């Protein structure tokens, strides 16, 4: 990594400080995130690994403003999320955070193109269709743009989902086990596309995965266990 | 910026994209709205067609451009001169009379004596097709007459037979197939007999004080028949002949009574239609809730992409409104087509003039009702979509469901429901009754919702049964997504309305037909001449020794003004307005009549000689705003007389005795020609033979006295009521159809859950019989509870209406209510089990693999 990116990393894209989160009620209440401090630099790619139930996905949701911590501060793209109400958070997400899910979560009644255009339509972009068309072309699905999700393969669906996540040019791209539902070859294609988007747009990438090989492609690997970040793993895992 | 964009076309676009998946899951929603809107649109279009038809045929129904009606007397020379100046005049006299056959069988007839100019508009249809003049012409001492076929049937006569009325003999030359001005005349107790005026005079029935009504109809010259001319003549008549006391009607107001009844009937049917919509609303709420539950992932995805909670709400609100419009459309089309259809198929046989047309106002109203109902029921579940959590996309866990939407959605729900209620009340003919109806419906709805909650609570708390089947049935009553709320609400509400209608109907019938009050008279005798009064009393004493005779003088009088305000300018509630609408029977006496009691003020003494005093029925007086000491001007026999209100009475209308709204002090009418009215009551009961024998003897001894047998009159009245009630009952049954729809929808929504249950239970060894029993028991328990409370609510409502509104005693008729309840329970169990059969038919393996 060059000096410029090192400078950018000085003002983090994501800054979590003293984040605690419990879920559930009464006896079923579980302390999921425990005193999380984490800075992710601009344009950095971070792989998040850990056993099931360690709090990876929950941490992603906290970063996306989908879950509010019980305590601690969350600053994403220079915006303190704690001060935003639900609607403001939704708008913030629409502009700044792209999400790729393990189960794609495309809207079944919309075509591929329409699925990609939705985030732009939601922020009132006048050229939503054109940009969505370009984004679909970038993931190699021009020919399939009028197909509905049910008419697409899993890999194609995930490519649509990726296009949808990238189309608003978000500052942050978060992906929750994006290859978990795909075969190896298809998964690899998706990963290539995702890293391509990350590099070309300088988007900060946060990736939850069980795949250590995939995690190793990131600038840094963060390891979670029982809701805590294991100290030894917060350093850059991949040599430059 | 984003909010502004979302508020424009995006919600519509996204809503439409969602609907690409088809309307599956919404059929019940659509059917509920369609049926409800259809009912209201059809009622509105039909009544508008009828009202327009009545207006269009106004001249024919009235018998002229203008009609001047006098009671007791014919016009004076100056009055006749005035009428003849205005256009062509035709005179018709109507009165009740007794027709007798040679062998002394008698029948009450509604006599109508017409002149040569009759009818000014339209035509009389006779069978055989004689000219009217030929049918009514005199041949020797015998007059011609045209009779309603019902008269021939009642007296078992063939055309050409003769009857006697008073002193004149008539030959029934033709049957009367149609009479153009029939609708303007109101309801009669007997069949029509059309005769000439010469013949009427020959009967000797025209005595001073006889209850004859003289109708003077005017046909304006064709070149000057405008509305302005009609108004000018009306004003001139009131100005130049203020003492005439005639009731003036114009062609635009030809049958106010009928129009009022159409309006009132329309109101009831509209309210029933609204109740049907209310029941359907439960189906709407279920459909929307189910839809949003299925769409949780999509909603969460949209939110993860930047949609706000309000944005999501807007998308699904738009979708709901689209669906409601889709549902309303067929309802509107069929509702609008119905008048055309009825006119096309039945036009020739219904006695009412229909003017089928598109009535956009009525259709728009039906559409608004449909949309508002859908909104009122959808806002709550839609509001919950606001807070669908995105975490469902990341985490495979069931979130505790938020029970209530945000306050703003709760307030919107309340607001729309209030607007719906306000609309229903504002547009009603009688706002008080509409308000009571709306309040009752809302009360029943809320109570039923609480009952449903209570049933679920009891089921949850019930001690664990050792029977697996019972345990399963009870668990199904309280589990999340149970049928309990849907069934209790829809079935309960539908039943409540139906039971209300049939209990009121049953009570009225019982009251008037089956169990006539013991003290009710057997006969009314009209037109007893003052000179015959003593002889009549003696006749009754001799012929019916045990009977109680009550005889009072009677005149007809019309209220001209109250406290200086002209009657036509007084705005009174319907409960009192009827007194102002036409002339009323009045009497005078020096003692308080039996069956009434002085409530306010003092009765005048037996020798009272001062200025005229009047005693009024209390409720009417209150409705007209009259207090003791106020003045009232009444036109009697062409003379305006002013009286002061001396006291207010309460009456026992139900006794069917002689009751008068207005009773005057005797000196008011000293020397006036009056006839008497009498009732005969058998305190120990009587037989039909006895009554018929008395009827025959009276007809011979007093040919000019008209006898009305109360039982016959009530049966005629009952026939009319039956037809009206059939309409309301039919409309009420619609709510049950709706309830079944809602039930079907709820069953379909729970289908997957049931398949799962059934498959798992069968996998662990449950037999089909056991499952069937468990499901049957569940449906039985829920529907029984719903029926119980539906019947209770309906009975309570009916009792309130009968006791409070109609002032009659209420008796619960359990047979009718039980029949309706059993039918509803049976429908629920059968429908439920029919759906369950398909569940039982599922092969477990594929389902288990998919789990």
Image (tube, coloured by chain):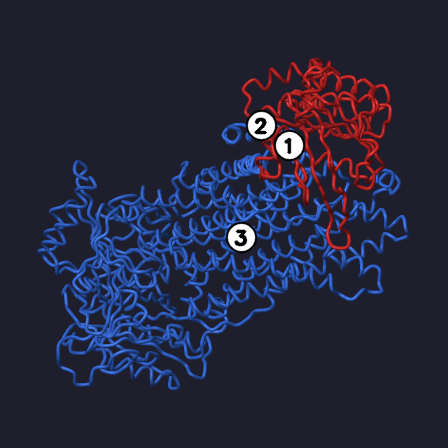
Chain colours: A red, B blue
Q: What's the mark number on residue B730?
A: 3
- Report if the CB atoms under discs 2 and 1 are less than 8 Å apart: yes
Q: Are marks 3 and 1 on the same chain?
A: yes
Q: Is mark 2 on a helix, strand or loop?
A: helix
Residue A111, visible in the rendered structure: yes
Task: Quarter of the image for the C terminus of chain B: give it.
Answer: top right
Asked if the residues shown at circle 3 and circle 1 are in contact, with their CB atoms under 8 angstroms apart, the answer is no
Rendering quarter of residue A66: top right
The residue identified by callout 2 is A122
Q: In this view, does B590 lie above or below B448?
A: below
The residue nearer to you, when weighing B334 against A163, is: A163
Q: Position of residue B663 (x, y in %)?
A: 24, 74
Q: How many marks?
A: 3
Whether B294 is drawn above or below B558: the answer is above
Pointer 2 local density, CA inside 10 Å: few below 14, some 14–19, many at least 20: many
- Give the distance between the C-alpha atoms of the residues marked 3 and 1, in whole angstroms: 46 Å
Query: Residue B302 shows which numbered tag?
Result: 1
Chain letter of the residue carrying label 1 = B
């Amino acid at each position: 990594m060059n000096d410029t990116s090192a400078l950018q990393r000085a003002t983090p894209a994501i800054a979590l400080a003293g984040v605690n989160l419990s879920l559930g009620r009464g006896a079923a209440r579980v302390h999921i995130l425990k005193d999380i401090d984490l800075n992710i630099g601009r344009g950095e790619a971070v792989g998040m690994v850990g056993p099931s139930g360690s709090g990876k996905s929950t941490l992603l949701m906290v970063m996306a403003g989908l879950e509010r911590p019980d305590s601690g501060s969350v600053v994403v793209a220079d915006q303190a999320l704690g001060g935003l109400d639900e609607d403001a958070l939704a708008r913030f997400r629409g502009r700044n955070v792209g999400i790729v899910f393990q189960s794609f979560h495309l809207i079944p009644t919309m075509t591929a193109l329409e699925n990609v255009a939705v985030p732009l339509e939601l922020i009132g972009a006048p050229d939503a269709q054109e940009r969505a068309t370009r984004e679909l072309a970038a993931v190699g699905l021009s020919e399939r743009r009028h197909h509905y999700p049910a008419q697409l393969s899993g890999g194609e669906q995930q490519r649509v989902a990726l296009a949808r996540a990238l189309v608003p040019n978000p500052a942050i791209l978060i992906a929750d086990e994006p290859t978990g539902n795909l075969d190896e070859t298809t998964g690899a294609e998706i990963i290539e596309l995702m890293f391509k988007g990350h590099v070309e747009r300088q988007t900060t990438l946060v990736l939850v995965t069980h795949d250590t090989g995939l995690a190793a492609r990131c600038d840094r690997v963060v390891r979670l266990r029982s809701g805590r970040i294991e100290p030894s793993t917060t350093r850059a895992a991949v040599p430059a | 910026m984003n909010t502004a964009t979302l508020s424009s076309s995006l919600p519509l676009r996204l809503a439409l994209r969602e609907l690409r998946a088809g309307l599956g899951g919404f059929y019940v929603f659509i059917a509920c709205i369609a049926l409800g809107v259809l009912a209201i649109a059809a009622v509105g279009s039909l009544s508008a067609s009828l009202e327009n038809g009545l207006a269009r045929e106004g001249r024919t129904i009235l018998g002229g451009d203008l009609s001047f009606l006098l009671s007791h007397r014919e016009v004076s020379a100056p009055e006749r001169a005035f009428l003849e100046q205005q256009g062509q005049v035709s005179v018709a006299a109507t009165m009740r009379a007794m027709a007798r056959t040679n062998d002394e069988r008698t029948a009450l007839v509604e006599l109508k004596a017409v002149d040569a100019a009759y009818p000014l508009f339209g035509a009389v249809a006779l069978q055989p097709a004689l000219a009217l003049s030929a049918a009514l012409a005199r041949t020797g001492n015998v007059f011609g007459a045209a009779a309603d076929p019902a008269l021939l049937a009642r007296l078992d006569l063939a055309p050409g037979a003769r009857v006697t009325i008073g002193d004149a003999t008539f030959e029934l030359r033709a049957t009367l197939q149609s009479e153009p001005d029939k609708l303007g005349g109101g309801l009669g107790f007997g069949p029509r007999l059309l005769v000439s005026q010469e013949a009427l005079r020959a009967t000797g029935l025209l005595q001073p004080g006889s209850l004859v009504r003289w109708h003077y109809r005017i046909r304006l010259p064709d070149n000057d028949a405008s509305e302005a001319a009609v108004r000018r003549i009306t004003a001139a008549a009131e100005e130049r002949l203020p003492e005439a006391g005639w009731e003036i009607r114009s062609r635009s107001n030809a049958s106010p009574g009928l129009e009022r009844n159409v309006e009132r009937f329309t109101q009831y049917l509209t309210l029933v239609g609204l109740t049907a919509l209310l029941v359907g609303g439960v189906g709407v709420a279920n459909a929307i809730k189910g839809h949003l539950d299925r769409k949780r992932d999509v909603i969460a995805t949209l939110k993860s992409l930047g949609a706000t909670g309000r944005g999501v709400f807007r998308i699904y609100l738009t979708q709901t409104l689209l669906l409601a419009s889709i549902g309303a459309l067929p309802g509107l089309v069929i509702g609008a087509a119905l008048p055309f259809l009825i006119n096309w198929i039945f036009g020739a046989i219904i006695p009412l003039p229909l003017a089928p047309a598109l009535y956009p106002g009525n259709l728009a109203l039906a559409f608004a009702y449909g949309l508002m109902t859908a909104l009122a029921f959808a806002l709550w579940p839609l509001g919950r979509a606001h807070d669908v959590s995105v975490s469902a996309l990341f985490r495979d866990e069931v979130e505790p469901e938020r029970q209530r939407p945000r306050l703003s959605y709760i307030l919107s729900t309340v607001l729309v429901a209030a607007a719906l209620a306000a609309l229903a009340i504002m547009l009603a003919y009688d706002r008080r009754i509409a308000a009571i109806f709306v309040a009752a419906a809302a009360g029943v709805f809320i109570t039923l919702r609480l009952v449903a909650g209570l049933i679920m609570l009891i089921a949850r708390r019930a001690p664990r049964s050792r029977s697996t089947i019972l345990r399963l049935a009870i668990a199904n009553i309280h589990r999340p997504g149970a049928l309990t709320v849907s069934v209790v609400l829809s079935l309960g509400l539908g039943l409540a309305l139906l039971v209300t209608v049939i209990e009121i109907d049953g009570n009225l019938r019982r009251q008037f037909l089956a169990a006539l009050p013991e003290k009710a008279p057997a006969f009314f005798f009209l037109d007893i001449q003052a000179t015959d009064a003593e002889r009549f009393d003696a006749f009754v004493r001799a012929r019916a020794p045990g009977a109680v005779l009550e005889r009072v003088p009677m005149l007809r009088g019309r209220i001209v003004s109250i406290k200086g305000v002209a009657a036509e300018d007084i705005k009174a509630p319907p409960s009192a307005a009827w007194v102002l609408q036409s002339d009323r029977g009045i009497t005078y006496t020096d003692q308080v009549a039996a069956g009434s009691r002085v409530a306010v003020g003092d009765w005048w003494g037996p020798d009272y000689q001062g200025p005229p005093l009047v005693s009024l029925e209390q409720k009417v007086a209150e409705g007209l705003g009259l207090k003791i000491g106020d003045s009232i001007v009444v036109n009697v026999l062409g003379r305006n007389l002013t009286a002061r209100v001396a006291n207010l009475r309460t009456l026992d209308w139900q006794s069917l005795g002689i009751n008068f709204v207005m009773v005057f002090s005797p000196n008011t009418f000293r020397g006036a020609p009056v006839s008497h009215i009498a009732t005969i009551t058998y305190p120990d009961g009587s037989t039909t033979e006895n009554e018929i024998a008395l009827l025959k003897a009276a007809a011979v001894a007093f040919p000019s006295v008209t006898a009305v047998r109360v039982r016959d009159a009530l049966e005629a009245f009952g026939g009319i009521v039956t037809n009206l009630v059939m309409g309301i009952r039919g409309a009420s049954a619609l709510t049950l159809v709706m309830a079944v729809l809602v039930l079907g929808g709820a069953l379909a929504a729970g289908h997957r859950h049931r398949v799962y249950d059934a498959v798992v239970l069968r996998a662990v060894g449950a037999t089909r019989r056991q499952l069937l029993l468990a499901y049957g028991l569940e449906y039985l328990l829920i529907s029984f509870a719903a029926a119980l409370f539906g019947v209770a609510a309906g009975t309570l409502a009916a009792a309130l209406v009968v006791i409070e509104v109609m002032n009659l005693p209420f008796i619960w008729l359990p047979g009718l209510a039980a029949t309706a309840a059993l039918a509803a329970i049976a429908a629920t169990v059968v429908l439920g089990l029919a759906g369950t059969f398909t569940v039982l038919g599922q092969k477990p393996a594929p389902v288990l693999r998919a789990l």
